[in-house]
Image (cartoon, coloured by chain):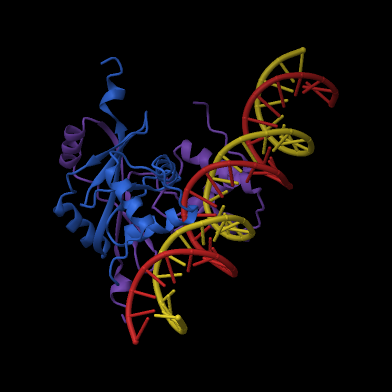
Chain colours: A blue, B purple, C red, D yellow
DNA sequence: AATTAAATTTATACTAAGTCTAAATACTAA
DNA sequence: TTAGTATTTAGACTTAGTATAAATTTAATT
């Protein structure tokens, strides 16, 4: 574990991801960088996203789609995906510790982490004429 | 929704997935079919897996790896992945209903379903000399 | 049994997302 | 300055899966 090395490219990508309200894919990040006047090599964007993820500065979300999404929020949290419109929202309440203890006991694993993706229908899709 | 049409290929694939103790990927399924004397076209395996998934006879697992895995167990359940050896085990205890209600209330979603993937270290990797 | 229609399989081309590689460039430390 | 390491770049490559069009199978109708 060596010290942080934020190159121009990595800094620009970090800033961009942190400024996003949503959870862009690598392709969307490249597009937005281009709109902001940056033009980095394809592989650099992937390298930087991995570097920033490994450094704990951003998070990679695997929500069951073909592409990963990235999130500037680094606190432990979960996501909920709308089946109708694809929108992704944050879920800040953590799974109860009691449940995790039960899972650890039953499976004989040391449980380090959990990824939870809820699926459902968001408020706007439930109330289309509001 | 039309009635079930289990062709030779679909039946063979269903039987194979149901007989597995583990959670094979499409590539592993093709390999095992070949070992059992079957030789189906590449696309047929993917088509059949989708057909069987849509029919509710098997489940597609997206555990954050590059490839989907398939599971002959159709009851609602979750998975735990060992970070060290990659082994995948079943988790049969469901998330507490209370927590799901809380998530629904906070996000304003109708929550239909949740995918949970735990990560940790399995018993064998914890006790390598046992 | 022959004929048509629909569904499925096959082979193969293609796509999307991401990794790998080798050369060029930038940064760091003596 | 010079050597050594790290990073970026461009582009080839890989993996997982989808799309397409022709061939085959299955089912339904006469």
Q: Is B97 left or right of B43, judged from the image as shown? A: left
Q: Which residue is at the front of the view, A25 or B123?
A: A25
Point out residue C16 in the picture as x, y percentages from the top left corner: 52, 43
Point out residue A74 in the picture as x, y percentages from the top left corner: 23, 52
Q: Which residue is at the front of the view, B111 or A106?
A: B111
The structure residue drawn at horizontal position 21% and vertical position 30%, both measured from the top left corner, is: B108
Please tell me how many numbered marks the rendered image carries: 0
Point out residue A65 in the picture as x, y percentages from the top left corner: 42, 43
The answer, for residue A126, to whether it is visible in the render is yes
The structure residue drawn at horizontal position 36% and vertical position 32%, both measured from the top left corner, is: A83
Q: Which residue is at the front of the view, A4 or B129?
A: A4
The answer, for residue B24, to whether it is visible in the render is no
The structure residue drawn at horizontal position 31% and vertical position 39%, both measured from the top left corner, is: A22
Point out residue B43 in the picture as x, y percentages from the top left corner: 62, 45
Query: Which image quadrant is residue C29 in?
Result: bottom left
Q: Is residue C25 above or below residue A94?
A: below
Split into 4 quadrants, where in the image is the C terminus of chain B? bottom left
Q: In this view, does A90 lie above or below B35?
A: above
The structure residue drawn at horizontal position 53% and vertical position 52%, both measured from the top left corner, is: B26
Q: Is B29 left or right of A120, judged from the image as shown? A: right
Q: Is A68 left or right of B35, judged from the image as shown? A: left
Q: Is residue D2 above or below residue B49?
A: below
């Amino acid at each position: 574990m060596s010290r942080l090395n934020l190159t121009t490219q990595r800094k620009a990508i970090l800033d961009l991801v942190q400024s996003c309200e949503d959870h862009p894919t690598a392709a969307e990040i490249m597009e937005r960088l281009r709109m902001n006047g940056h033009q980095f090599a394809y592989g650099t964007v992937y390298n930087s996203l991995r570097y920033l993820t490994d450094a704990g500065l951003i998070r990679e979300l695997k929500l069951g789609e073909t592409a990963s999404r990235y999130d500037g929020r680094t606190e432990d949290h979960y996501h909920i995906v709308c089946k109708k419109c694809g929108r992704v929202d944050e879920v800040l309440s953590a799974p109860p510790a009691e449940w995790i203890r039960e899972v650890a006991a039953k499976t004989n694993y040391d449980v380090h982490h959990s990824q939870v993706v809820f699926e459902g229908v968001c408020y706007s899709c439930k109330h289309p004429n509001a």
